[in-house]
Image (cartoon, helix red, strand yellow):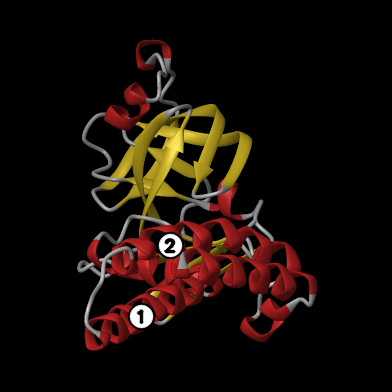
């Protein structure tokens, strides 16, 4: 019965906290504070198990301190969820350089420099996952023959009538139009690109026909930032 009374008092206190916009002290809006109430009530019910049996005063104090800590962590985790998500994304970016780090507030998609010194960008081209190398020296998006086939392009009917310069020397390429390229949260349609002959290109390139559609792109130390 004592626990029920305490739970009712806590519930009433939470309701008053929401109405008084007490979450503002933690950077939460009134709506966000209200969304926390169900979580806290569940934690209160779970914590009730610690008080449902007779225990020594020392055990009750320890249990109370534990659940106060759990409540505090839950609130702090919710309040700083964007920052926690950003840090987690950066860790993933360091371990897997081609994975995008997405900032939902600014619309920026970032990538970490790979061990080879290049920025690898994992993109989706016409529904197929294709790794690209960021290259401002490429006048267009350039796909290797293998990657072009993965995107569904019928390479048997392409006309390789354009001379291109690649890391492997001069080669020939065919002009195509890609229906859709998605990098992180950035999507572009009808992007002009080239497909190279077999052996002319080791890795496909993210060139200017995509980059020039962005509001901003920048390289800062070991980070590449693309802004929608």
Residue neighbourhood size for the residue with mark 1, other residues' Cα within 10 Å, grouped as few (<14), some (14–19), many (≥20) = some
Q: Is residue 52 left or right of residue 135?
A: left
The residue closer to the viewer here, 127 or 49, is: 49
| Helix, strand or loop status at disc 1 | helix
Residue 227 visible in image: no
Q: Residue at x 42, y 17 (%)?
A: 158
**Mark identifier at residue 191:** none
For disc 1, the marked residue is 64
Few, some or many residues within 10 Å of mark 2 (<14, 14–19, 20+): some
| Residue 186 falls left or right of residue 128 | right
User: In the rendering, at what x and y percent does residue 200 appear?
Assistant: 26, 38
Q: Quadrant of residue 29?
A: bottom right
Viewer-nearest residue: 219 or 98? 98
**Rendered position, 17 above or below 88:** below
Residue at 64 percent across and 54 percent down: it is 212
Q: Which mark is residue 43?
A: 2
Residue 88 quadrant: bottom left
Residue at 50% in and 63% down: 4
Q: Position of residue 78 (x, y in %)?
A: 51, 68
Q: Could you tell me residue 68's position as x and y percent? A: 41, 80
* Image-based side of 214 in relation to 218, left or right: right
The quadrant where residue 202 appears: top left
């Amino acid at each position: 019965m004592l626990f029920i009374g305490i739970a009712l008092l806590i519930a009433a206190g939470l309701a008053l906290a929401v109405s008084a916009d007490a979450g503002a002290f933690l950077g939460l809006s009134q709506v966000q504070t209200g969304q926390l109430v169900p979580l806290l009530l569940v934690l209160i019910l779970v914590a009730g198990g610690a008080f449902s049996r007779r225990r020594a005063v020392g055990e009750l104090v320890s249990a109370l301190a534990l659940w106060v800590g759990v409540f505090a962590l839950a609130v702090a985790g919710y309040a700083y969820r964007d920052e926690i998500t950003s840090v987690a994304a950066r860790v993933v970016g360091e371990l897997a350089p081609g994975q995008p780090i997405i900032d939902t507030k600014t619309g920026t998609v970032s990538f970490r420099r790979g061990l080879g010194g290049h920025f690898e960008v994992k993109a989706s081209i016409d529904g197929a996952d294709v790794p690209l190398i960021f290259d401002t020296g490429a006048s267009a998006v350039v796909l290797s023959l293998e990657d072009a086939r993965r995107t569904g392009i019928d390479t048997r009917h392409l006309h390789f009538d354009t001379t291109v310069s690649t890391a492997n020397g001069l080669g020939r390429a065919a002009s195509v139009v890609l229906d859709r390229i998605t990098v992180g949260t950035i999507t572009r349609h009808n992007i002009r690109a080239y497909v190279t002959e077999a052996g002319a290109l080791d890795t496909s390139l993210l060139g200017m026909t995509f980059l020039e559609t962005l509001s901003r792109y920048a390289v800062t130390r070991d980070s590449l930032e693309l802004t929608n």
